[in-house]
Image (cartoon, helix red, strand yellow):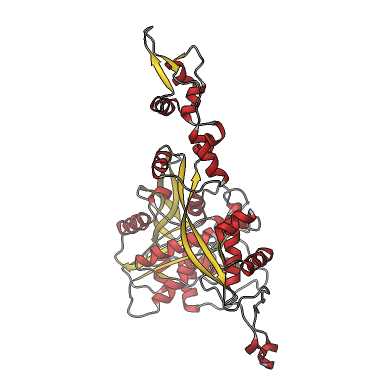
Amino acid sequence: MGDIRERILSHLENNEDADTLFLAEKWDETHQKIVGAVKSLQIHEGIIDAEQKVSSKLELTKEGRAVADSGSHEALIFNSIPEEGILQSEIMKNVPNAKIGFNKAMSAGWITIDKSDGAAKVLRKVEEITDSVQETLKQLQNGTITKLSDSQFKDYKKRKLVTEVKVTIYVLRKGPNFSLTIPEPEKDLTDEMLSTGSWKNKEFKPYNFNALGIMPQSGHLHPLLKVRAQYMTIFLEMGFSEMPTNNFVESSFWNFDALFQPQQHPARDAHDTFFISKPMNATKFPEDYLERVKKVHAEGGYGSQGYKYDWKREEASKNIMRTHTTAVSARMLYKLAQQKPFKPVRYFSIDRVFRNETLDATHLAEFHQIEGVVADYDLTLGDLMGVIHEFFKKLGIQKIRFKPAYNPYTEPSMEIFSYHEGLKKWVEIGNSGVFRPEMLLPMGLPEGVNVIAWGLSLERPTMILYGINNIRDLIGPKVKLNMVYNNPICRVGIEQLS
């Protein structure tokens, strides 16, 4: 670039003016390279004057270059005819672009057709020809000529041999501050320039505010976070409020006992639950509520006979990694029961839970649970089914079925199934139910208040949406960062989930 700038200045020193297209052809450089050097010189105010003009230039098309190399279509037709002539059908079959070439050769008077023997036979009408089309295109190609007559241009353009290209050129002249020496402007304003005042006599490179610049490094949302945001939007549209879920460590009391889940239940075994060694036990509980929970477990109450076993506080105080976010729902419902008068609520949560699972392609020791809870007077199973239908409709899932199931803390309970068009079968997508009176009444909620709830995982719909077959490719230490960078924004819709 520097060498071309110096050659431009040297040329202007010895000549009045020049245009960039002329210089490109003279020095056998690309026009764009000459223009780049001119723009670099324009940074230095007054060295050169550059007047922009738009010029047209003729260029050969691909077909035009083939004609310049091998001859025009009509010349190819003429050269394919032997002295004794040839059948027209043979020419049309064997010579490229025979139709246009035949017509042009006939118009030029180079060939004739003899039908005396019945078949159309093509004969030469002249001894030799001059292929003026090829010669003209060669001259355009090597720059011997730059223009065509109007009739030639119309004919060649119609035959798609040439095309007219608009070229932006610059006419160059010496500027008022013309110099053969190119001053290098300062790129940065330094502390030293400011302290000494030398910046006043410096020339600085101007800022190009139209330049796009380099895209800054930025973070990328994990697919789980994208899908989570979509679920949150749906809950908020339905009038739900988010529950605080920032306590991964929970006591067995809130995780199991408050949900009317007996202490001898298999889910409370170390094979299914992660127990915490330090601190091993929780110590603070709402004592009056704890006594009511103990009583309904051990003796019954509120119309229930309970489980009839020796309920132990030390078992309830064991700290665990929470196995479901329903523990959070229990805390929120107890807090709601303390507020008088009772006000209906809609809660939701999306957060991590932990199970002592065997790891495989569809199971990890931790996953995300999505939970919706509605508390109001006289809610029924029909209300639960209606809310679930609306929730999954917003997800794009239209075909829903319910199957009776068992949960320790809901009665009735239902598993939720959706028809998977790809698999051509019904697949389980969630669980639901109405919280039992043995869970709600010890909290202090008024009689007649029912709580409906449902839950599903976050990982499974995310894997379906993004076409991921192994859960360990979605979350965990082996996740590939390119997967996070390259996956698009999540759009939950019928086409993806139905």
Q: Quadrant of residue 103?
A: top left
Q: Quadrant of residue 377?
A: bottom left
Vertical comparison of 82 with 320: above or below:
above
Relative placement, left or right, of 379 versus 186 is: left
- The residue depicted at 60 percent of the width and 61 percent of the height is 34
* Coordinates of residue 287 in the picture (x, y in percent): 50, 78
Residue 107 seen anywhere in this rendered image of the structure = yes
Relative placement, left or right, of 305 versus 216 is: left
Residue 316 seen anywhere in this rendered image of the structure = no
* Coordinates of residue 167 in the picture (x, y in percent): 49, 56
Look at the image and tell me in which quarter the N terminus lies: bottom right
- The residue depicted at 42 percent of the width and 71 percent of the height is 333
Vertical comparison of 353 with 332: above or below:
above
Vertical comparison of 105 with 461: above or below:
above
Q: Nearer the viewer, residue 210 or 257?
A: 210
* Figure label count: 0
Q: Looking at the image, which residue sits at the far front?
A: 127
Q: Nearer the viewer, residue 217 or 498?
A: 217
* Coordinates of residue 91 in the picture (x, y in percent): 46, 19
Relative placement, left or right, of 269 versus 137 is: right
* Coordinates of residue 414 in the picture (x, y in percent): 40, 52
